[in-house]
């Protein structure tokens, strides 16, 4: 079908996630992608663009890896579906749970599988409350989360999200509290609420959708100590950072901190199949085994779907065999250097942030006085970058004006240079228009 026919049908029948209905109806789909290879995506009209955000920060190994398709087909032919409820199991889910345990830091070694990050976060929130309930501490049910965090869109995950735009609904899940990124703020909140009412603290190692915000120095070490002191469980949401994005296997490896629970998704399959999970520590596992006296009534039909597990195993094999995390370190250095070069060149860049192949540029009209442009410039820069064949994301929540990029791990030096030069050209064009 041609673009025009597909676009009409899209407008008529497809309810898009995170959409503005008016914009969708007025503009139709910006791209209708038909194929992908490496860092490139091709649209039905033949235009090729660089997938500068690895789609939704998830297509980490890059597009078009046939091996994952073959792994999926092999598994579907052999065993398309099998329940994992109660004592049911199958080979791939066991192999994947073992693989994740081997990769995970510290004593994190038992995984509950879901179909994505939101379900995995909700699972973690239910698990920590269940745990405290088993210990007879039923008042310990509040979950502290950070402002500017993003944890997903299911009821629990949107309630845990520290970006008010995602919580603009008439009713949400109770018992979520929000703090800024200072230890003092967290200490104050714990003192006000009482540690005996707090079940867990949740944080991304590096906030993604909230603007690519690496934590303050020593932040997580202090968080770990504070959580231990007050008997609060620490959940790390590794949905973006897990499996290599920051140049280490997990984001928390950068901060030498082991959480009690790790939430994973996206990069475990590089987006080739929907899969997420919650990984718990040996200590938590042993306590749950010891304390539990009934059934933990929580499980998704697709918890540990055989095809998704097979795809994940193949994806993790590729990441290891092709030393893609080393490439993230090397290309990450080039990428972050490129951002610094952009900041030297463009006065309006007030800040560059990032780690590995996760990076952002902050824009201000006047960085001395911290004045913003009347309209966010990042939106225009991203539009202009598309004209030059680069997909990225502008983040404008909370008055920010941020350009964010996170290309696939298979990117090479020349391609990093292309990405930086397109951002440069696009900024120059947009800034000239504003003069
Ligand atoms: N947590 C983080 C840090 C994320 O970035 C996302 C998605 O972007 C999620 C959770 C939600 O994952 P999903 O969209 O798979 O439900």
Image (cartoon, rainbow, N blue to C red):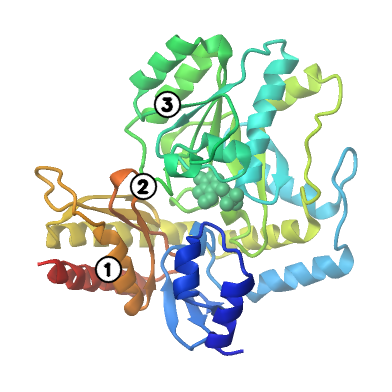
Q: In this view, does 251 lie to the left or right of 101?
A: left
Q: Residue 432, how many percent across, how many down?
A: 13, 71
* Residue located at (53% from left, 40% from top): 169
User: Residue 2 has which mark?
Assistant: none
Residue 64 in sight here: no
Q: Are marks 3 and 2 in contact (CB under 8 Å)?
A: no
Ligand 1 neighbours mark 1 (CB distance < 8 Å): no
Mark 1 or mark 3: which comes first in sequence? Answer: 3
Circle nearer the viewer, 1 or 3 = 1
Q: In this view, does 138 lie to the left or right of 405?
A: right
User: Residue 423 has which mark?
Assistant: 1
Q: Element type at marker 2?
A: helix
Tell me the CA gap for discs 1 and 3: 35 Å
Ligand 1 neighbours mark 3 (CB distance < 8 Å): no
* Residue located at (69% from left, 48% from top): 99
Q: Element type at marker 3?
A: helix
Front-lying residue, 35 or 260: 35
Residue at image mark 3: 221
Front-lying residue, 414 or 354: 354
Answer above or below: position of 424 versus 396: below
Q: Residue 342, how many percent across, how many down?
A: 20, 62
Residue 147 in sight here: yes
Q: Element type at marker 1?
A: helix
- Quarter of image, res 326: bottom left
Q: Residue 371, how many percent across, how many down?
A: 15, 46
Q: Residue 420, how many percent across, how many down?
A: 28, 68
Answer above or below: position of 207 versus 417: above
Mark 2 or mark 1: which comes first in sequence? Answer: 2
Residue at image mark 2: 397
């Amino acid at each position: 079908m041609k673009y025009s026919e597909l676009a009409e049908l899209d407008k008529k029948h497809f309810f898009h996630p995170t959409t503005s209905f008016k914009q969708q109806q007025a503009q139709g789909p910006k791209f209708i992608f038909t194929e992908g290879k490496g860092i490139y995506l091709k649209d039905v009209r033949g235009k090729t663009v660089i997938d500068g955000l690895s789609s939704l920060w998830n297509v980490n190994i890059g597009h078009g890896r046939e091996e994952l398709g073959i792994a999926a087909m092999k598994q579907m032919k052999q065993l398309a579906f099998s329940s994992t409820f109660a004592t049911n199991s199958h080979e791939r889910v066991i192999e994947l749970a073992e693989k994740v345990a081997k990769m995970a830091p510290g004593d994190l070694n038992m995984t509950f599988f879901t179909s994505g990050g939101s379900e995995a976060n909700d699972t973690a929130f239910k698990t920590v409350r269940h745990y405290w309930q088993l210990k007879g501490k039923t008042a310990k049910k509040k979950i502290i989360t950070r402002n500017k965090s993003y944890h997903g869109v299911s009821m629990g995950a949107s309630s845990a999200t520290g970006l008010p735009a995602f919580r603009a609904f008439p009713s949400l899940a109770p018992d979520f509290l929000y703090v800024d990124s200072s230890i003092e703020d967290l200490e104050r909140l714990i003192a006000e609420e009482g540690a005996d009412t707090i079940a867990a603290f949740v944080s991304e190692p590096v906030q993604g959708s909230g603007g690519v915000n690496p934590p303050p120095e020593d932040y997580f070490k202090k968080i770990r100590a504070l959580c231990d002191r007050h008997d609060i469980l620490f959940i790390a949401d590794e949905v973006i950072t897990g499996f290599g994005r920051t140049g280490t296997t997990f984001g928390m490896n950068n901060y030498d901190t082991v959480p009690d629970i790790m939430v994973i998704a996206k990069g475990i399959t590089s987006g080739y199949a929907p899969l997420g999970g919650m990984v718990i520590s040996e200590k938590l596992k042993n306590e749950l085994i010891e304390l539990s006296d009934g059934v933990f009534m929580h499980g998704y039909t697709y918890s540990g779907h055989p095809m998704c597990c097979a795809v994940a195993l193949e994806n993790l094999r590729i990441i290891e065999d092709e030393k893609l995390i080393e490439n993230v370190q090397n290309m990450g250095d080039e990428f972050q250097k490129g951002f610094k070069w952009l900041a030297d060149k463009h006065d309006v860049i007030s800040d560059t942030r990032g780690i590995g192949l996760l990076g952002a540029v902050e824009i201000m009209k006047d960085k001395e006085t911290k004045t913003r442009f009347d309209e966010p410039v990042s939106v225009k820069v991203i539009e202009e970058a598309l004209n030059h064949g680069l997909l990225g994301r502008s983040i404008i929540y909370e008055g920010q004006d941020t350009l964010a990029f996170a290309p696939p791990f298979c990117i090479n030096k020349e391609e990093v240079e292309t990405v930086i030069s397109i951002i440069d050209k696009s900024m120059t064009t947009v800034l000239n228009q504003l003069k």
